[in-house]
Image (tube, rainbow, N blue to C red):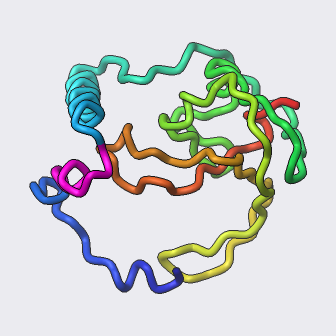
Amino acid sequence: MTQLDAASEPIGEWSVVNFWRPLVSGNVAPAAFVVGWLTHLFNELQHQRGGIGFPAFEPGGRDGERNDNRFTPGDLATVRSSAAIRATLDDRLIHRGLGFEPDMLKHCGSRIHVQAEISKLIDIVSGDMRIMKTPAYLLRDVHFSGERQLFNAQYEPLFWRGVWLDR
């Protein structure tokens, strides 16, 4: 894992193979592939015209003073609403250095068991161990599906801040 960056080659931004690989390999159903591409094209158009992409956050006021909840593996957590989560994020959708991915929105309102608390990470580019000042959590059977980014990096773990979860 620490040599992943060195062992990888960049894929061209407009590589045809990269676009079709999920469909041809059978990782994505044809209908999901079409929906993913249409969503991507819609978001690109919205970005060009300064509009709101999909999925959109509910508007929410700043809630930066809220304390992070602490969880232990096995605890049942409820993912807060998109408005409540948006209130904890800055303009780049980041809370204390951890980004909130649009792929995470579909889990808002779900009740899910905490799988693990994460306080250390290996930076895959440098190979360095990073200590997190605020822990993140993995939720059981919740992973990045890739559908919001043209099916790339599927099944990567999603990291959740305690402030995004309720007991």
- The image quadrant that residue 18 belongs to is bottom left
- The image quadrant that residue 106 belongs to is top right
Between 91 and 138, the one nearer to me in the picture: 138
Between 96 and 139, the one nearer to me in the picture: 139
Task: Tell me if I can see residue 44 in this picture.
Answer: no
Quadrant the C terminus occupies: top right
Q: Is residue 7 left or right of residue 37?
A: right
Looking at the image, residue 101 lies above or below residue 62 = below
Q: Is residue 60 left or right of residue 126?
A: right
Q: Residue at x 52, y 20 (%)?
A: 57
Task: Tell me if I can see residue 33 in this picture.
Answer: yes
Q: Is residue 20 shown in magenta?
A: yes
Looking at the image, residue 76 lies above or below residue 72 = above
Looking at the image, residue 132 lies above or below residue 91 = below
Q: Residue at x 57, y 40 (%)?
A: 100
Q: Residue furthest left?
A: 16
Q: Residue at x 28, y 27 (%)?
A: 39
Between 61 and 135, the one nearer to me in the picture: 135
Looking at the image, residue 153 lies above or below residue 85 = below
Looking at the rendering, the stretch of residues picked out in magenta corresponds to: 19-28
Query: Could you tell me how many numbered marks the image carries?
Result: 0
Q: Percent from the top left, x then y, of residue 130?
A: 68, 72
Classified by dominant secondary structure, the portion drawn in magenta counts as helix
Q: Percent from the top left, x then y, of residue 128?
A: 61, 81
Q: Is residue 150 shown in magenta?
A: no
Q: Percent from the top left, x then y, of residue 25?
A: 24, 57
Q: Residue at x 67, y 70 (%)?
A: 121
